[in-house]
Image (cartoon, coloured by chain):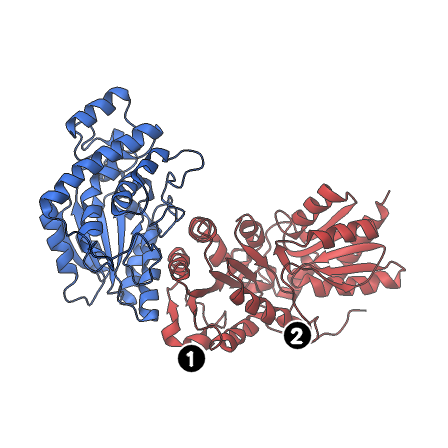
Chain colours: A red, B blue
């Protein structure tokens, strides 16, 4: 029932994509916080040491220096784990980067419970909620490594603050190599008329599997990849609500302030229909990523159940 | 010439001229805050000679071209002391003096805390501790671009309670930011009370030295001493430099001097008149 997909590491893809851009974007500089091997910026550090600065685990300063570089025409890619890169320097992101509208790119890996064994303090389940509250930021949560390449390149060539959310674990590849990412434009990955599943990040793959299960029961689910959470493609969300009459959101993030909140807001304002949310309900624990996905209900079965419930609530 | 190396030739200010300017700008500060009905007089008055030294003798910049790539950068990290900054920016030619009357008013370019919407302001501010990191980013950008501009960051002493100041201090030394000069406005009063009552900072010189900085101390109101100190910062730059400028909070207005009550409140009508009389 569950499709077999190639697995690929989005954080390794990130590090390799940076190297690809070194010549075409001479203003790119990379800033790290002592986690460069884990976020794969060590590839850049070792090849372009004069365009790399390490600040140790001192994230307020990391973001503050990034802001100063951005204000002087550089394109700083600032990278660490999502819990450290968003949580600790939130005020610097707010005052310097967002209110200053600076061209800084925050790319964080190890988001969500896929960080696994390191446990709850390492699980960045609040990052989307925090970062989406900052008006100037564009927020992208790629579904796989193919999308990561293009999201990172788009961030480099698009003026303004960006946040890109990546995982620790290798994740299923759901796109062909000829896929074309369009910032702010949701991607319909499967047609369907009974219910629409809006998914982001690793939950896109999970939702495609759920749609297969639903089809076996005669329910045709549309699956839409919301890679850009901000600015979100309201048109695609409204169309899904209008054309299928019931929606589900699916994210590997806390239920408050992430994709579910965004979808509910757009649907409620424009096209009220039943909304079900698949998301984390609270903190998790130390275990392997795949065990946590099951324990936290981020599985095709749970997405399928949510879709059936949404369909059953149609008037 | 404005500063030592500005593109447009101009006037080189003598010390007596700068001292007279300080008195005029103190009046501007009091008037700006009184007109707004709120603001931070204490730190604006304590920082003034530091800013005057930088803008009228030390820095190179072009008010007609605020984004000039080769300008020296000034970062006001203690962003609440914006009235002193605005008085100096206005006098330096970045915007008309009349605009000071719009401070904290609707639709003004002159915000409560300094923001880059004001010509001449590099960084958004208002949350303490951020300016030294930002200044280090500017300093590293100069290196990457092969430029020789200097970066000056003005910090409050109470602001040095912020951990980010010391993150930035450690990393500026590590990354050998020799074109970075921090100035601590050591007026010994922070928001609530005297700094000694809130959080012990001394020995402040040793803290900076231990973090890898070259340290100078000076009277922060004595213009010849300040100018001499800034001159010294240009010699043998092998480390980042900090100037601990000993100042008096509320300097120039007797009842504001060394008075924690005037960190963040405007004078009333009677106090306003008295202050202007003292500064006449």
Say which quarter of the image contains residue A185: bottom right
Horizontal placement of B15 versus B56: left or right? left
| Farthest-out residue, right | A218
Task: Residue under label 1, please give it.
Answer: A47
Horizontal placement of B196 versus B80: left or right? left
> Which dot marks residue A210?
none
| Farthest-out residue, bottom | A47
Vertical placement of A284 versus A178: above or below?
Answer: above
Question: Residues under labels 1 and 2: Cα distance?
Answer: 27 Å
Identified at 81% across, 62% down, the residue is A191
Identified at 17% across, 57% down, the residue is B215
Identified at 66% across, 47% down, the residue is A261
Question: Which of A87/B258 is in front?
Answer: B258
In the rendered image, residue B179, in percent from the top left (x then y), is placed at 25, 63
Question: Which of B224/B229 is in front?
Answer: B224
Residue A175 visible to the viewer: yes
Residue B202 visible to the viewer: no
In the rendered image, residue A231, in percent from the top left (x then y), is placed at 61, 53
In the rendered image, residue A172, in percent from the top left (x then y), is placed at 68, 71
Chain label for disc 2? A
Task: Residue under label 2, please give it.
Answer: A7
Q: Quadrant of the C terminus of chain B?
A: top left
Secondary structure category for the residue under label 1: helix
Q: Residues within 10 Å of mark 2 (few under 14, many from 20)?
A: some
């Amino acid at each position: 029932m569950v499709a077999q997909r190639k697995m690929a590491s989005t954080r390794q893809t990130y590090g390799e994509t940076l190297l690809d851009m070194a010549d075409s974007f001479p203003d790119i500089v990379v800033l790290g916080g002592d986690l460069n091997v884990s976020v794969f910026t060590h590839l850049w550090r070792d090849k372009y040491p004069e365009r790399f600065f390490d600040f140790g685990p001192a994230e307020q300063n990391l973001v503050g220096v990034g802001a100063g570089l951005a204000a002087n025409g550089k394109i700083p890619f600032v990278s660490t784990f999502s819990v450290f890169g968003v949580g600790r320097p939130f005020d610097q992101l707010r005052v310097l980067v967002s209110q200053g509208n600076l061209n800084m790119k925050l790319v964080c890996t190890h988001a969500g419970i896929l960080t696994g064994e390191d446990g709850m303090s390492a699980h960045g389940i609040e990052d989307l909620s925090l970062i989406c509250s900052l008006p100037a930021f564009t927020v992208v949560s790629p579904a796989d490594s193919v999308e990561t390449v293009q999201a990172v390149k788009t961030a480099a060539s698009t003026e303004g603050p960006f946040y890109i959310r990546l995982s620790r674990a290798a994740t299923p590849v759901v796109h062909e190599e000829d896929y074309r990412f369009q910032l702010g434009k949701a991607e319909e990955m499967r047609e369907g008329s009974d219910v629409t599943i809006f998914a982001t990040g690793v939950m896109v793959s999970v939702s495609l599997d759920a749609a297969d299960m639903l089809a076996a029961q005669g329910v045709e689910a549309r699956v839409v990849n919301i890679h850009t959470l901000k600015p979100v493609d309201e048109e695609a969300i409204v169309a899904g609500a209008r054309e299928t009459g019931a929606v589900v959101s699916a994210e590997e993030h806390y239920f408050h302030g992430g994709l579910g909140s965004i979808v509910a807001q757009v649907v409620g304002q424009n096209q009220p229909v039943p909304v079900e949310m698949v998301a984390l309900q609270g903190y998790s624990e130390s275990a392997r990523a795949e065990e946590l996905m099951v324990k936290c209900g981020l599985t095709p079965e749970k997405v399928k159940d949510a879709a059936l419930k949404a369909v059953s609530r149609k008037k | 010439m404005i500063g030592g190396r500005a593109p447009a030739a101009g006037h080189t200010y003598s010390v007596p001229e700068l001292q007279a300017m300080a008195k005029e700008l103190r009046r501007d500060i009091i008037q700006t805050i009184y007109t707004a009905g709120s603001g931070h007089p204490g730190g604006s008055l304590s920082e003034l000679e530091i800013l005057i030294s930088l803008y009228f003798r030390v820095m190179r910049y072009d008010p007609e071209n605020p984004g000039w790539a080769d300008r020296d950068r000034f970062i006001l990290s203690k962003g609440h002391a914006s009235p002193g900054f605005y008085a100096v920016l206005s006098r330096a030619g970045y915007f008309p003096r009349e605009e000071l009357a719009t401070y904290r008013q609707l639709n003004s370019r002159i915000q409560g805390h300094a923001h880059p919407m004001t010509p001449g302001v590099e960084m958004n501010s208002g949350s303490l501790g951020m300016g030294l990191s930002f200044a280090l980013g500017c300093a590293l950008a100069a290196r990457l671009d092969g430029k020789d501009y200097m970066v000056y960051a003005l910090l409050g002493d109470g602001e040095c309670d912020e951990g980010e100041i010391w993150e930035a201090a450690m990393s500026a030394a590590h990354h050998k930011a020799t074109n970075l000069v921090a100035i601590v406005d050591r007026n010994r009063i922070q928001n609530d009370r005297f700094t000694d009552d809130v959080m012990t900072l001394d020995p402040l010189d040793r803290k900076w030295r231990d973090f890898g900085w070259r340290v100078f101390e000076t009277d922060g109101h004595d213009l010849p001493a300040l100018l001499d100190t800034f001159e010294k910062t240009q010699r043998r730059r092998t480390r980042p430099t900090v100037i601990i400028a000993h100042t008096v909070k509320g300097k120039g207005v007797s009842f504001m001097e060394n008075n924690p009550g005037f960190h963040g409140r405007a004078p009333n009508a009677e106090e306003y008149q008295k202050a202007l009389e003292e500064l006449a």
